Amino acid sequence: MEPAWRQQGRGRGRSQEAQVERSRPLQRERERPGTATGRGVRTKTGSTPEPPHGLAVQSKFEEIRKSNQAAAQRLVESHFSSSSDDEDDNSIDDGDHKEGKRGKILASAFTTYTDQTGGDATGLQRTGQYVSDLFQSGALTCLICIASVKRTQAVWSCSSCFSLFHLPCIQKWAKDSVFLVSSVTDEDFGQKQHPWPCPKCRAEYPPSATPNRYTCYCGKLQDPPADPWLVPHSCGSICQKELKPACGHTCLLLCHPGPCPPCPKMVSVSCLCGKAQPLPRRCSNKAWSCQQPCGKLLLCKQHKCSQPCHTECAPCPRVSVQKCVCGREKAERPCASPRWTCQQVCGAPLSCGNHTCEEVCCDGDCPPCPRSISRTCPCGKTKSSLPCTEEVQPCGDTCDRRLACLKHTCSMRCHRGSCETCRQVSDTHTLITHTLITHRHTHAEPCSVSLQEVEKECRCGRYRKQMPCHKEYLCDSKCPKTRNCQRHQCRRKCCPGNCPPCDQSCGRTLGCRNHKCPSVCHQGSCYPCPESVEVRCTCGSTVLVVPCGRERTTKPPRCKEACRCPPSCHHPTREAHRCHPGTCPPCKQPCLLPLPSCSHTCPQPCHDVVLVKSQQVHLAGPWEQPSEPAFVKKALPCPPCQVPLPTACFGEHEVSPVPCHRQGRFSCKRPCGRPLTCGNHSCSRECHLVNSNPCEVCEEGCSKPRPSGCPHSCPRPCHPGACPPCSQMIRQRCHCKISLLYVECTKLTAADEQTKEALSSCNNQCPKELSCGHRCKQVCHPGVCEETCQQKVKLRCPCKRIKKEVLCSLSPQFAVECDDICREQQKKVSQLKEAEQRAAQEEEQRKLQEELEAFEKRQQRGGRRNKKRGRREEVDDERSKAARWWRWCAAFVLVPLGGALLSAATYYYLQESA
């Protein structure tokens, strides 16, 4: 839910306006020719031709323009009717117009009442104050949110104190109040119906009375529209509420805030005592006295009322001699309290004839004898009906009445009087009882009795202690629980849990920020501050009463009196203006004070009191925030005289007007232009006096052209003749870009191309690499290196047995071929490999043949074999398999491995021999 101050234009009071505005486009649509008259049906007359496209666009534009103007007008009206907080106090005519408008609204609201009273409005003071506050800026304030109540916001009015609250604020207040009471008092939360109080007068309302609708003051109209010619939140009709005190008449005013005024009707009534004839009186003041003595008999039945005409007689103020209730004594007593009792016992015989009445100052009706009714023995176990002269004897049974400890019972025989202190006997001692039976009386005599301490729990249940049974155990621990206020602790010693209500003062700061809550410490929000503050205008003639806390944000009331503040400048009087808050506007009259250095007067506006920005204080560090610039009132001096006077410049170049305060020759800001002593330049200074201030000396550098190739400028200042030769050194890289060389500028610019190459060489070996990978052998040179490498490299034959050394540049032209020895070695190696392969193939063929023969033998034998023969054959088969595996390894692993080793040995041998 948004706060009330943000709900401008969203209250329920705008619902009817919104419906009317929504209905206007529908009416326009119905009024258009050719629009739909039914649901989904379009009518078109043949006589009416369809307008051209240009006219249709123009009519649509005019319609949109009119709707926009109407919306802007509604926005302006809603802005002016929203609140009086934003009124502009600068226009006097506008203020007079609003005052007249306000008076007309008040007069129209009170017309029906003043017609009955003949123009007398003395009974309308209280109601008129409520109505007048609706039109004053800041007078109506919602005490819940401390915000202004605007005429377009939904409100609720208390029927007891007639205070206005925002409808969302009072709904939230009622809900929170019921919730807090239910959370504290209800065991079954939310089941009971608790009332909620008014924030100001604390009048209680049932939960069913929680406002849920926005109605006018009289309650007839829901969501009343905002009418600028009616009282805000009013329906404009007659109130017709029942007047209080009830007289049978209703209120005659228009719907209004605050209480209804006294009844203005004329009725015929008699006086208070009813002796005089009826007279016409105002219904609100119909009780009158004829001032004749009353003469009625008072309650004392001895005197008559001597007061003038009144309604009920007061108690008799006289003193007389009166008897007590029993009639034995007499004394002077006020007639207003004739019944009194003495201190004598009655003593009259009772109905039994054996006893007397023991009542004090009995009036004669004595009660029956208390011994004549059914009585019990002292322990209460046996009932008996005996004459009143006989005493009821003890029954002889155990007493069994609860002792003071409330845990044990009396162990003695039935006896008269109170039971003794609890004596719980230990297991090591015995109670020796001597029973003496005489006339049915029993007496118990304890012997060697000892008190036993029992373990008792304290009242709060936190500690236990050994102590006598008849004593109560209270510990010293303080209760840490919080009281019903949920702010303070109980702090009561040995608290059993039923903590008492908090008795401290609340002391929280109220919403006004000026006072503290005087109520007892409580839960929830504090009630609004009941105080009111007077806001006065500057002169004190006009007073506005606002709730406490609103004086800081409420504008002072508008005052029609003239401002009485004395002038703060040198002028004798101020400009005429109304009483206003704050400082007076600055004086706009011309200064007209004589200037000190000439005969002219100051034409500027008055500057005796001017706001000047004060100097900023330097911050001590980044933790300090810069404050806003402060302004100080100061009296500024008169500005210099600005009257123009014709004056020539120093060089007599021109004649221009100069202000009076700067009278005298001046510089025209143009360059001097006279030739300097160097003969090459002219004076560049501003216009100046030639006699006292000669022209400048030329300090510019030499600007003559330098020889080709020289990047330096002439070091001498501007001079006549040729420049001297350059003697500076030039730093440059050598051809190989490794070393830095310093060469004199004159030698470098005067040398030819071959000399320049020699000066640019560092005379070291060139670090560049050739395409073959070797370093260049020449001295540092420009350009690309020559590809004639003189480095020697080794060449080998394809089998790597023969090697030769040749120059790197000639290596692509030479090739080393294998000789006959190399060929023989290669032939032997190939023959060895072929023999190994043949041996492996033969071994494989033999294995296959053996397997085939073994399979054929098994097929020829056929039939069942005995177990021994089968086992022997299995062993033979395993042996044959192992032999075949070893032969396979020898053929395919050992033979190639041996051939490889042999070929490697042969190769190394041939290498060594070569």
Image (cartoon, helix red, strand yellow):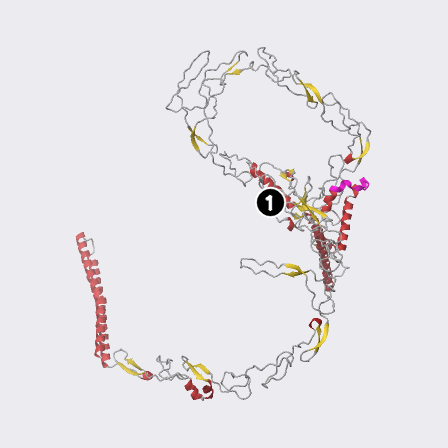
Task: Give whichever of 292, 708 is nearer the camera.
Answer: 292
Q: At 72% from the left edge and 40% from the top edge, which residue is drawn? A: 259
Number of numbered labels in the structure image: 1
Q: Residue at x 78, y 38 (%)?
A: 264
Tell me: residue 581, above or below residue 316.
Answer: below
Q: Give above or below for 165 relative to 878.
A: above
> What is the magenta range?
114-126
Image position, residue 735 (x, y; %):
41, 82
Quarter residue 422 falls in:
top left
Q: Is residue 616 left or right of residue 555?
A: left
116 in the magenta segment: yes
Residue neighbourhood size for the residue with mark 1, other residues' Cα within 10 Å, grouped as few (<14), some (14–19), many (≥20): some
Magenta stretch mostly in which secondary structure? helix
Residue 192, image quadrant: top right
Of residues 126 and 491, the one nearer the viewer is 491
Give the SS element for disc 1: loop
Residue 817 in sight from this viewpoint: no
Q: Is residue 328 left or right of residue 868?
A: right
Residue 427: within the magenta?
A: no
Mark 1, residue position = 509
Quadrant of residue 894 in the image?
bottom left
Query: Residue 28: x, y in percent?
Result: 73, 55
Q: Position of residue 152 (x, y in %)?
A: 69, 49
The quadrant of the image that shows the C terminus is bottom left
Q: Is residue 174 visible?
A: yes
Residue 813 screen position, x and y as percent: 32, 84
Kind of residue at badge 1: Thr
